[in-house]
Amino acid sequence: MSDEKVESLDWSAWLDYENSSFNSLPESPGVYKMHIGMKILYIGSGNSLKESLQLSLSDPCINQAKRYSYALTSSPDTVKNQLLLEYRSKHDGKLPACMEKI
């Protein structure tokens, strides 16, 4: 189990899907948030950020996202769970919009 804290993550700037290239994304493990109109749609993780982000866009709900941000971490699933707990605590126990159906 990692001791990495959500607060210590070094998040990228919000990147627009239209103006960014997935080719420049790291293939390192990490977490990411997908965003539209001031709302987080999805929080994801993977052992390859590049691959995980690309795969997640095949979901029609997630494909609505306009921007994303990511952070590298050696324990992406643990950090994703921490991010979801934090999100739920701030949003009356609800998950991000595209995760409610999961």
Image (cartoon, rainbow, N blue to C red):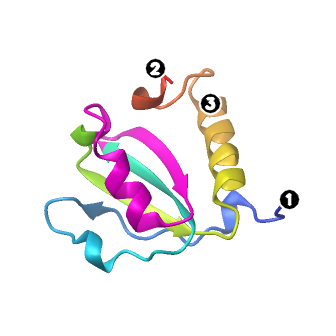
Of callouts 1 and 2, the N-terminal one: 1
* Residue at (56, 72) in percent of width and height: 10
Q: Residue at x 44, y 51 (%)?
A: 33
- Name which residue type carries label 3: Arg
Q: Is residue 50 left or right of residue 45?
A: left
Tell me the CA gap for discs 2 and 3: 15 Å
Q: Magenta region: which residues?
A: 36-62
Question: Disc 1 and disc 2: Cα gap in Å?
Answer: 28 Å
Q: Amino acid at mark 2?
A: Lys
Is residue 55 in view from this perspective? yes
Could you tell whether 63 is left or right of 101 in the image?
left
* Position of 96 relative to 35 (above/below): above
Along the line of sight, the residue nearer the viewer: 13 or 41: 41
Task: Name the element at disc 1.
Answer: loop
Looking at this view, is 35 or 54 the one in front?
Answer: 54
Q: Secondary structure at mark 2?
A: loop
Per the image, the residue denoted by label 3 is 88
The residue most toward the left is 18
User: Tags 1 and 3 in contact by the CB under 8 Å rule?
Assistant: no
Write down the residue under mark 1: 1
**Number of marks present in the image shown:** 3
- Residue at position x 62%, y 39% in the image: 84
- Mark 1 and 2 residues: CB-CB less than 8 Å, in contact? no
Mark 2 or mark 3, whichever is nearer to me: 2
- Residue 61 on the magenta span: yes
* Quarter of the figure with the N terminus: bottom right
Q: Position of residue 25 (x, y in %)?
A: 36, 74
Identify which amino acid the numbered label 1 is placed on. Met
Question: Residue drawn 56% across and 22% down?
Answer: 94
Residue at image mark 2: 101
In this rendering, the answer to whether 24 lies above or below 20 is below
